[in-house]
Image (cartoon, rainbow, N blue to C red):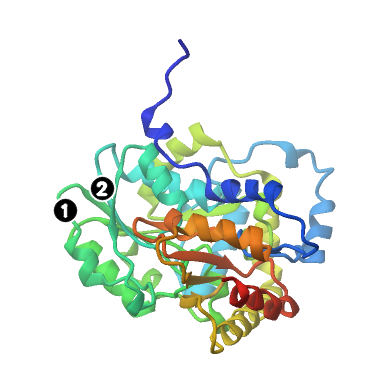
Amino acid sequence: MSMMMSPLITGVHFPPISEVKRWLAERPLDGRELIDLCQAVPDYLPAPELTEHLSGLLTDPLISKYSPDEGILEVREAVCGYYGRKYGAQVSPGNICLTIGASQAFWLAIVTLCRAGDEVVVQAPYYFDHPMALDILGIKGVYASFVEADGGLPNPVAIEKLIGDRTRAILVVSPSNPTGAITSPETIRTLFDVAKRHNIALILDETYNEFIPGGLRPHDLFSDPAWGGHFIQIASFGKTYALTGYRAGLLVASEPFIHNALKAQDTMVVCQPRITQHAVKYGVEHLDGWVAANRDMMTRRHDLFREEFLQPGNRFRLAASGAFFAWVHHPFEGCSGRQVAKRLVDEAAILCLPGEVFGPGLEGYVRLAFGNIREEAIPEAVRRFRELV
């Protein structure tokens, strides 16, 4: 008899991106180049000046050593400067813990905030890693339904109705992964007020905060002197600076929350790698213009895709889109998102993700990501959707 594994983890679905990429080995070779709309990874390289800066640090004997658990003070001070420009925020280095990507920041937030049996209200469609983590930890996700007429945006009234005695947090992703929908500053403020009213946390995942068209300020919560009592931000510089493999995440919260989160940080990873921290510091101090140019490029990709996709005669329906993503309703009644995504791989040489991995009852959708598709390839991608029968 083999050793037992936790039913909390065996009951969680396999990572969806790994699942669909396995389909590629079975894909018929018809001469067409694969169009990858699956993973939200920038197709461009980091800024050359950042790479050159890092290469000069490799002989520094400290670069291969641990840093403080929360990150190097000078790096966190530089991040505070970025938050001042981006949010008008008054945050201190004590409000910041640098993490192994936004996913680890989420785990850190949840294990600091919740116990097994607690509940988190989650806006659907959700980023699939979030409920996977909750399920593994024995924390119940309570899901606010996707309303296509609302463009996938959270409804504070509907969310408040889901709060119960065991609720510890409201979780929202903006810009949304998977819909791309951007929650307005006014709605974010209302959700924060709901959290305060119920003495719980608003957890806001802002991994794609630099891809809001025009570089607009995402919200004004950091201007509230009491923001730390009910607001936790998880974020990432991985997409911002094309450093996804560097795992450049961060957790921003009150100083008492960070103090306690460091107990978990030390047992999880100890610290973000020093080379990553130096990449972040260089980025926030020197690359605002580079980031803005890439934001404009991603906006053009989105806008062109939307224009092409909405032309008459397309049986697929664009339900929501923005920033890095499009959320598309497929036309095949009775078919799951997995079945349609598999058909798209086999018959159209398009790789995307099925809707059901983003929430219950979402089998009628697929998610598309624009990180890997150049503007010149967009018309061909849309043509392949139109031709699938």
Q: Amino acid at mark 1?
A: Gly
The structure residue drawn at horizontal position 29% and vertical position 67%, both measured from the top left corner, is 192
Q: Which element type, helix, strand or loop, lies under badge 1?
A: loop
Q: Name the residue that disc number 1 marks.
A: 164
Q: Estimate the x, y position of residue 104 in percent, counting from the top left.
A: 50, 46
Residues packed near mark 2 inside 10 Å, few (<14), some (14 to 19) or many (20 plus): many
Q: Secondary structure at mark 2?
A: strand
The quadrant of the picture occupied by the N terminus is top left
From the top left corner, tell me how far across and down residue 216 is, in percent.
51, 81
CA separation in Å, label 2 and label 1: 8 Å
Q: Nearer the viewer, residue 37 or 32?
A: 32
Residue that protrudes farthest toward the left in the picture: 165
Label annotation for residue 138 = none
Could you tell me which residue is drawn at 39 percent across and 37 percent down? Answer: 136
Q: Is residue 22 left or right of residue 126?
A: right
Task: Give me the residue at 24% from left, 39% from top.
Answer: 117
Q: Is residue 197 left or right of residue 345?
A: left
Relative to the observer, which residue lies in front, 232 or 159? 159
Number of marks drawn: 2
The outermost residue toward the top is 1
Residue type at the position of mark 2: Glu
Q: Is residue 372 left or right of residue 7?
A: right
2 and 1 marks in contact (CB < 8 Å): yes
- Expressed as whole percent of the image width and height from the top left, the position of residue 102 reads 52, 53
- Res 119 label: 2
Near-viewer residue (311 or 73):
311
Circle nearer the N terminus (2, 1): 2
